Image (cartoon, grey):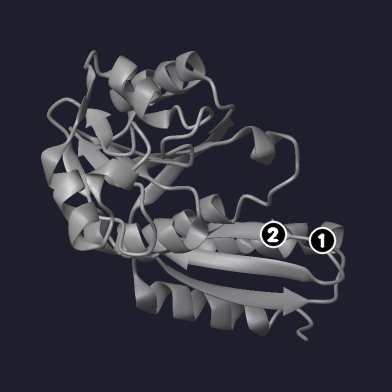
Amino acid sequence: MNVAVVTVGDELLAGQTTNTNATWLCEHLVERGVDVERVTTVPDRTQDIARVVNEYRAEYDAVIVTGGVGPTHDDVTMDGVAAALGRELEEHETALAWLEADGYSRSDLTDGTADLPAGARPLHNEVGVAPGAVIEDVYVLPGVPAEMRGMFASIEPAFSGTATYRETVTTPEPESALLERLEQLRERFDVSVGSYPGESVRITVESTDEETVAEAADWLRTRVETV
């Protein structure tokens, strides 16, 4: 299964808010064996959201959109997703019923709070107010991290794939000195190898076969300085 993640928010593009949602989603999707092939951030503009969602729906098994959900003037994600799928927004009775059960009277709710694309399956917001939605292969979640994580738990079983195993070997050697050994590692084992320099170099070894990963990591550890 391959997935694209779309995060919405002017504040993300301005550097005012760290995009922790993208990192968290990628981590949890990969843990479930899902390939995350795109992470894109778009502004709070209906046409940009619609264009990206429409493009990614054609390329990937699912699109997860987070942020810009709610009734305020800059919460236009539902509008953008509805436009991408050629649907109208309409007030969703199930979402309203959930909100009433949570103690919100209809008269107290801001107009648009429960507006979802026509035919959407609502997702209950256990932590906040604004509901999410599932429309075909598009999953719309709030941008508040606690709300997003809580809502993702309700759809998590929809995302699955072949588990990927990973081990990390850390070495103080410079990356340039490791090239020959990394090439030998790739030739000897059917694994993906990543090299990430910093104060030390982190080398990741990945495969869908756990035993192969363990053997490859052990082979590498005997051939590099480790920390």
Q: Position of residue 1 (x, y in %)?
A: 27, 46
Which of 107/42 is in front? 107
Which of 80/97 is in front? 97
Q: Quadrant of residue 204?
A: bottom right
Q: Pointer 2: what residue? A: 195
Which of 218/78 is in front? 78
Crowdedness near tag 1: few (<14), some (14–19) or many (≥20) residues, C-alpha within 10 Å: some
Vertical placement of residue 223 versus 68, above or below: below
Q: Which mark is residue 160?
A: none
Crowdedness near tag 2: few (<14), some (14–19) or many (≥20) residues, C-alpha within 10 Å: some
Q: Quadrant of residue 135?
A: top left
Which of 16/186 is in front? 16
Whether residue 91 sits left or right of residue 204 in the image: it is left
Label 1 close to label 2 by CB (< 8 Å): yes
- Residue plotted at (53% across, 50% down): 22
- Residue plotted at (25% across, 62% down): 102
User: Residue type at mark 2?
Assistant: Ser
Q: Position of residue 73 (x, y in %)?
A: 51, 27
Q: Position of residue 191 (x, y in %)?
A: 47, 61
Whether residue 76 sits left or right of residue 223 in the image: it is left
Whether residue 175 sits left or right of residue 18 in the image: it is right
Vertical placement of residue 143 versus 68, above or below: below
Distance from the alpha carbon under mark 1 to that under mark 2: 8 Å
Q: Pointer 1: what residue? A: 175
Q: Quadrant of residue 79?
A: top left
User: Residue type at mark 1?
Assistant: Glu
Secondary structure under tag 2 reads: strand
Q: Which badge, 1 or 2, is on the more N-terminal residue?
A: 1
